[in-house]
Structures are given as C-alpha cells and as structure tokens.
Image (spheres, grey):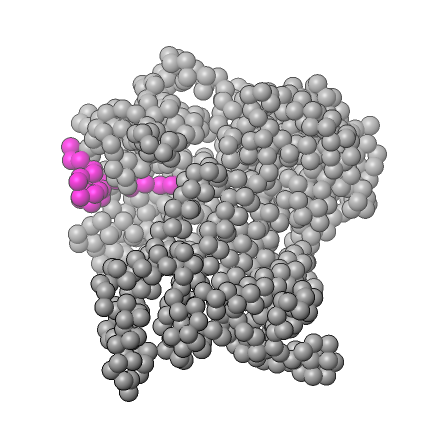
C-alpha cells in the first residue's frame, strides 16, 4: 500500500510539473507580447513599459517560470492587473463559495444516485428500473441552466423558500450560507446524479452476475443483504472514477449556474478575468484547477486501493 | 426416509423446459453423483434444491429436505436454510469468492448471518473450519484475500464456508473441474472425509465419469433434462442399461489408432529455451528478480511425430507454446523449425511461422463473431506472400472444411451458428488450410463434452492418416494425451522432468512427479462393454 501510494504521489508531482510548464508556455511563450495583449493595441508606451516591468518580461523565460512557480509555492499568485489586488486573496474568496458548492452538489448527487442506481439494478427489467432509467435519461438531457431557472421560478419566485440568487457570505452563519447554496447545488447535482445513477446501476448489474454473488446467496444471505455486503464495494470502482471526474467538473464547470444564481465563484472569476485579459489571474486560476483535478485523481487512486485489495499489491 | 427426496421435478425457464420429471434422493452419509453432458440439467437440479433458480423459472414437483417441502417455503425461511442446512460448493474457485473481503471474514459471515454463534466464537469456529479443510490459520492467515491463494486453496475456503454450520446436505457443482489432477484428488479426499465425519449427504454434480466412479455411492445419469438411469455405482457400471450411459462411458475412455509414424529428421527443435519474466520489484533498489517460467527446455519433434506435453497449471506449458509460436522472445536458447530460427532479432520470422498453426482451447472465444467461416479459416493466408485467390481460394476452403467433416456450404455461415465441437473442427480447418508442417493443439479438446471430444480425437487420428500430421499436443488431461500421442514430455516448474514413448511413460513412470500425476488421475473402472451381456433396450 505504501509503495502504491508513493508511486501515485510521484506521478502526481510529475503531472503538476508538466502542467505548470504547459500553462506557462501557452500563456507566456506564445507569440505576441503578453503586456501588449493585456493592454490592447491603443496602449500608451509608458503604461506598456510599466506592465512589462511588473510582469517581469525583461527577465529571461526560465527565470520567469521559476519565479512564478516559486511564488505559487509560497502562496503568492501575483497581483491582478485589473483589480490591483493579490490574486491569492481573490482566489481564496471565490474558493470559499465554489468549494462548498462543489461538495454540497456532490453530496446531493451521491445521495440521489446511489439509492437510485441500487434500486434500478435490483429491479432490473421491471417497471421500477424502467421508470428510474427514464428519469435519469431526462436528468442527463435537461440543460442545467434551464433547470436552475425552473428551480428559481418555483422555489424562489412562487414559494419564496429561497432567495433567487446572491451569496450573503459565511459570516452570516453556516445555515444562511448553505441555504443560499441549496438551489444552485441542486441544479448542479441533478445531471451529475443522473449520470452517476446510471453508472452505479450498470456497475452493480455486472457484479450481480458474478459467481461470488451466487456464493453469498448460497450462504443464506437474502438478495438485499448480498447486494449490500458483497455487491456494493465491488461496484464502487467505476463509480469512484465518475465521482472523481465530477468533482473537477463541478468546481470549474459551474460558470453558468454561478451566473444564473449570481454567485461569486471561481467560474465567474475566470470568465471575468478572460474578458478583462487579466492573464495573471487566468494563469493562476487555471493552475489551481489543474492542481485540484490532479489531486482529486490522486485521491481516487488511493480510494481504489482502499476498495480493492488486489490493487494494493500490484505495481 | 431419505435426507433429500426429489420427486417429479420439472423446471422451465421462460417457457422452455429445462428439467423433466426428475426423481432423485440422497440419504445421510451418502454420496450421490449426478452426471451427464452440458445441457443435461445437472446444475439446474442443484440450483433447484437451493431454490436459487433464475427469476423467470417455473418449478413443478416436490423437493423435500428431511420432510420439509422446499418449493413451498417462503424466501425468509429459505435464507435461513441455505448455508445452515444445505451448503454449496461451486465449480469456479477463482470467482466464487468475493475479491474484496478476507477469506476469514467470508467464512465467519456464514456463521454470523445465521446467528449461530456470537462474533468472537464465530471467528474461532471459522478458524477451526479453515484448519479442517487444510488451511490452518497459523500457516494461511485468515486475513489473506482470495487473490493471494491458489485455485485449490480457494476451493478449500469455499468448502469451509459451506460446511461451517455442519449442513445436513452438501451440494458440490463440478467442485474439481477447474483444478489440476493432484489438487482434484486432494479436494475429493477432503469431501469424502467430511461426508463420513459429519454424516452429511453429498449431492455431487460432475461431467467426469472417472471422478464419479471413484467417489459416488450412487449415480444418476441425466440427458436433456431427464434422468435416464440411476443406481448404485458398481451396479450401474456393471449393467449400463441405457445406451446413453454406455455412450458416455465409451466416450470417456475413447482411444484412437494412430497410423505408424515415419521419418527421423527433426522438424521442431527446442534447445535450452529459457523464458523469464521480470517480477514486480519488492525492494526500491537492488536488482530486479526474474521468474523462469520455462527453464532450460530441450526437445526435438521429428517429422510425422505426435508429441504430447503434459503438466499442471503454472508449469510453463502455455508459455512454452507461445515461445514456440514466436509470439514472445525467449531469453535463452533457441527454437528452430526446419532448422530455421522462429524468432529473429526483428521479431518472429513469418516465413518460418507459416510452417506452424495452432488450435486453441476455447471454441467460443477464439473466433471473431463478425466474420464468416470462409474468412475465419483463411486467416493464416496473411502469412503467405501470394495467398490463393478466386476459385483456388474457394477450393482450398472447401477442401479444409471437408477434411474436418464439415460441408463447403458452411463457409458462408457465422461462427455463432455452430456448436462447440463444430467450432473446434473449424479451428482445425483454419490450422490445416496452409498445410503447415506442424500443428500445436493447446488444450484443444479440454472444453468439450466427452462425446464431442471423442469425435474430435477421431478426426485428429483420421487427419494423421490423410494429411500426415506432425503435432505437439498440450494438455492437462492424461487420458487424452495417452491415446493421441507417440511420445510425451512431462513438464513441471518450467522443466521437462520426464520424456519417453507415451505408453512406456504411462505404464512405467520413472520420475516421482509423473508417478504422482498418474496416481492422482481418477480412472474409469475396467469394464469390457463388448464382452459383457447386457439386456436389450
């Protein structure tokens, strides 16, 4: 297990190093002057020179790369050109919305998907299975911004249970914060839950056909017990893979939902930064997202090994 | 009163009858074997007793265990009975255990779900059971996972689970079919010992008549969902009233006459061949370790010779086969076909390779289901520089199909339209079509029913006559190798431990391993059917 973890950890480090190089190369080494690009064609020469100095464009490329990476390692992501504030602070503010929203949506997704998938698999071919699969089909097909607007119409505008948008901040209390994130989390979770439920169902159906499920029944376990004790853990591998992919998607892919609910999340930050040609922010946020995706994959790899003992001894 | 009494059992699945009017009984301490070929309904009979039939199955008739009618029992009571009063052992030990739970936990579970003992005592009892089946906890930690055990050891775990609560009835569905002969002998001994020790009834399902004759007190012969003959083992073998029973018996010990071989020049020459695999590193630094799957093997196959290669799983015979075919490079020694090396620095030499063809074990997995037979059997043509086309190709296809007893019209069909035996014929046609000097039969008849196997062996013998075949016949089945080869190699742990004329090796084995192999193989009772008076049917 230690060897396995070490191997994964080394692969994580290497992936991060490669990713940082690629991001740096794309943004800094790509043809054209980043400072010129950020300021536009009508920039004054002295403003341009000032920005070039600020970006360190007068130093060599390797030096710039090392300075960038070194800064990030110390938590210094540079200063946003548009807002004139440290990028680290901006990202931290947004993360406080995006991360809880991601986790919230993921929890809802799992809570919906697991029972739905298990239910459908245990009633394979019957009406309950068909109904569940029909529902998840709809869940995958409905655009989440439309679903988000329906949620706003029903629960905010008509029933007035929730606010239609905005985020009051965590200093108003955990409940208030979670309350504000509930509708967006549901809107984000629905399609994810539908996909996850379908994966859960097919993974479980595969496992149900295995010989050891028959052994479990021959021991005297009921159908339900056999699924619970022997089926689920074996079905988790493909499910974990999908969950890993969803975390990354939820964290960065929530732009539209953030827009609908007017939430100050990471998605909106990167959207605004691109519009404002604020390369410093774009570079840092992209690196952060890459970091999160790779770290989540690393954790999924570890989770595989926890679930499946065969992976612990393999190289 | 019998322990298990099945009367008039009929089962149909989705309207298709699977079992018809099956009568069968098992008494305490009795071993009853149900035998027959695939599709005879023997496994379905076992699952009917467990009441673990597919959901769309309809069941009629009666199954009584100690007077309790099982077909009428509600599911909750069936759960309480399964595992406690009836234990079951399955064919595939490799997949019958949950890969993510330790073996100890899986045995304990049987005890706990029936609430037989509190947790700590259950664990102690489970360890006792594991010791009983030959896996004492001080040598085989119960915290091991199934993938850390061999097939035979896994089957012992399955047995420990099945007998943990001392069931009245044990059902064993082909319990040794997936195991090596020496392991098979140990498992059969274990089952026999448990039956007398626990005074259990054992209902054993097996296709292997030799195993049956060694083990069973009584035999039930099934065909196509019906019981055709039943009786005490000795009596049944002595009488064999039903022609199907006789056919099974004859097919099981089927032997063929091979034509005299001729020629003394070497066709295939294997010299000091070493095939080593790098093992996963156990230390971060230090040299990598290697496993020598084939360790200095030497032999020569002469033209016209039929050579056998026997050995148990893991002995390296498949690895050696792949090396001979040039599919993998060897790490030492060389393999020559007609004095030319099969494997060169640039990979397998196709010009040499076209002199060899192979027939694999699995008649279901070794064909592309989307191609027609004509395309399937002409696959070896890609080895030729100028493969025949047009009428010449069609003639070659027709000839190859006719040679294996099929019709040239079959060339237009897809592989799913054929039975297992026919598919194996097509595999042989595929091997014959470029008229190779050497054919490798890699467990080519191991997956077939005895009657089909007998006909394929006949076919091979006929082809020896008509096509002058030379082949290497790789098998774990000693009785088949004995009849179909002139000379035999016995392989163990990567080395050839004995080599000689087949009949000589089998009648007078010299190496202790060969002796053990032959002693472990179950044998049919020696009955001369032709010179025996039997009533007409």
Which is more toward the observer, B378 or B230? B378
Which residue is at 83% across, 37% downward? B68
Q: Is residue A269 above or below residue A247?
A: below
Vertical side of B426 occupied by B438: above or below: above
Residue displayed at 56% across by 24% down: B140
Q: Which residue is most to the right?
A: B67
Quadrant location, the C terminus of chain A: top left
Q: Residue furthest left?
A: B339
Q: Which of the pair A115/B384 is nearer the observer?
A: A115
Q: Position of residue A91 (x, y in %)?
A: 48, 67
User: Which of the two residues, B48 or A258, is positioned nearer the viewer here?
Assistant: A258
Q: Which residues are magenta?
A: B338-360
Give the image quarter of residue B124: top right
Question: Is residue A147 in sight in this rendering?
Answer: no
Q: Residue A289, located in which quarter of the rendered image?
A: bottom left
Q: Which x, y percent locates residue A180? A: 65, 72
Of B132 and B196, which appears nearest the observer?
Answer: B132
Residue at 49% x, 72% y: name it: A267
**Where residue B25 sits in the image (x, y, percent)?**
74, 31
Return the x and y of residue B28 as percentages of the image width and height. Answer: 75, 24
Above or below for A244 versus B278: below
Horizontal side, residue A108 vs residue B7: left or right:
left
Vertical side of B164 occupied by A234: above or below: below
Q: How many labels sit on residues?
A: 0
Residue at 51% from the left image edge and 24% from the top image edge: B183
Q: Using the rendered image of the protein, determine whether residue B178 is visible from the camera's viewpoint.
A: yes
**Is residue A63 left or right of A146 when viewed as pictured?**
left
């Amino acid at each position: 297990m230690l060897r396995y973890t070490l191997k994964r950890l080394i692969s994580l480090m290497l992936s991060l190093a490669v990713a940082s190089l690629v991001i740096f190369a794309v943004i800094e080494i790509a043809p054209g002057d980043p400072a010129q690009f950020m300021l536009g064609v009508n920039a004054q020469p002295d403003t341009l020179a000032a920005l070039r100095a600020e970006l360190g464009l007068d130093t060599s490329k390797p030096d710039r790369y090392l300075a960038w990476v070194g800064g990030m390692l110390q938590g210094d992501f540079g200063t946003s050109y548009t807002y004139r504030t440290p990028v680290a602070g901006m990202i931290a503010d947004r993360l406080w919305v995006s991360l809880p929203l991601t986790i919230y949506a993921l929890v809802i997704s799992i809570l919906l998907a697991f029972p739905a998938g298990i239910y459908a698999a245990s009633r394979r071919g019957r009406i309950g299975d068909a109904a569940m699969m029909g529902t998840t089909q709809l869940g995958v097909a409905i655009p989440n911004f439309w679903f988000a607007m329906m949620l706003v119409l029903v629960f905010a505008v008509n029933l007035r249970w929730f606010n239609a948008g905005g985020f009051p901040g965590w200093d108003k209390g955990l409940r208030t914060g979670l309350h504000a994130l509930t509708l967006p989390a549901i809107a984000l979770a629905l399609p994810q839950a539908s996909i996850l439920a379908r994966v859960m169902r097919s993974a479980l159906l595969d496992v149900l056909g295995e010989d050891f499920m028959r052994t479990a029944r021959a021991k005297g376990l009921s159908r339900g017990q056999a699924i619970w004790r022997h089926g689920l853990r074996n079905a988790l591998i493909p499910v974990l893979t999908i969950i890993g992919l969803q975390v990354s998607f939820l964290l960065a892919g929530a732009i539209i939902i953030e827009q609908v609910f007017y939430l100050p999340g990471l998605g909106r930050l990167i959207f605004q930064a691109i519009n404002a040609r604020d390369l410093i922010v774009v570079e840092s946020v992209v690196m952060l997202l890459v970091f999160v995706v790779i770290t989540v994959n690393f954790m999924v790899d570890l989770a595989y090994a926890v679930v499946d003992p065969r992976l612990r001894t393999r190289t | 009163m019998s322990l298990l009494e099945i009367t008039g059992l009929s089962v149909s699945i989705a309207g298709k009858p699977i079992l018809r009017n099956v009568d069968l009984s098992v008494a305490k301490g009795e071993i009853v074997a149900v035998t027959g070929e695939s599709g005879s309904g023997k496994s379905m009979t076992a699952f009917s007793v467990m009441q673990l039939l597919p959901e769309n199955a309809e069941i009629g008739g009666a199954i009584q265990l100690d007077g309790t009618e099982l077909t009428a029992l509600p599911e909750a009571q069936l759960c309480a009975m399964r595992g406690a009063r009836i234990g079951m052992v399955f064919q595939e030990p490799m997949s019958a255990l949950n890969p993510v739970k330790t073996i100890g936990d899986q045995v304990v579970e049987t005890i706990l779900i029936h609430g037989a003992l509190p947790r700590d005592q259950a664990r102690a009892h489970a360890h006792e059971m594991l010791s009983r089946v030959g896996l004492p906890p001080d040598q085989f930690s119960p915290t091991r996972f199934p993938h850390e055990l061999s097939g035979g050891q896994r089957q012992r775990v399955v047995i420990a689970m099945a007998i943990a609560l001392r069931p009245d009835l044990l059902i064993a569905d082909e319990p040794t079919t997936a195991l090596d002969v020496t392991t098979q002998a140990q498992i059969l001994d274990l089952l026999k010992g448990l039956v007398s020790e626990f005074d259990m009834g054992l209902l054993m399902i097996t296709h292997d008549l030799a195993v049956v004759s060694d083990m069973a007190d009584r035999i039930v012969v099934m065909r196509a969902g019906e019981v055709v003959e039943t009786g005490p083992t000795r009596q049944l073998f002595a009488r064999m009233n039903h022609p199907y029973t006789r056919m099974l018996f004859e097919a099981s010990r089927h032997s063929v006459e091979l034509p005299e071989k001729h020629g003394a020049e070497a066709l295939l020459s294997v010299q000091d061949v070493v095939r080593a695999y790098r093992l996963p590193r156990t230390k971060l630094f230090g040299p990598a370790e290697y496993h020598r799957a084939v360790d200095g093997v030497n032999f020569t196959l002469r033209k016209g010779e039929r050579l056998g290669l026997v050995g148990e799983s893991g002995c390296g015979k498949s690895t050696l086969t792949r090396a001979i075919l040039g599919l993998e490079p060897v790490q030492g020694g060389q393999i020559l076909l007609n004095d030319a090396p099969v494997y060169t620095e640039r990979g397998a030499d196709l010009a040499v390779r076209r002199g060899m063809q192979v027939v694999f074990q699995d008649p279901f997995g070794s064909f592309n289901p989307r191609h027609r037979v004509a395309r399937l059997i002409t696959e070896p043509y890609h080895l030729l520089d100028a493969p025949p086309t047009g009428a010449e190709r069609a003639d070659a296809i027709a000839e190859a199909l006719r040679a294996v007893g099929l019709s040239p019209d079959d060339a237009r069909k897809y592989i799913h339209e054929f039975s297992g035996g026919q598919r194996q014929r097509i595999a042989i046609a595929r091997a014959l079509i470029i008229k190779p000097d050497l054919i490798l039969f890699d467990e080519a008849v191991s997956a077939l029913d005895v009657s089909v196997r007998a006909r394929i062996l006949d076919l091979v013998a006929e082809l020896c006559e008509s096509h002058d075949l030379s082949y290497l016949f790789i098998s774990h089945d000693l009785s088949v190798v004995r009849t179909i080869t002139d000379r035999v190699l016995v392989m163990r742990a990567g080395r050839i431990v004995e080599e000689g004329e087949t009949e000589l090796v089998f009648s007078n084995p010299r190496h202790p391993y060969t002796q053990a192999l032959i002693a472990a193989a179950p044998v049919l009772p020696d009955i001369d059917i032709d010179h025996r008076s039997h009533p007409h049917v």
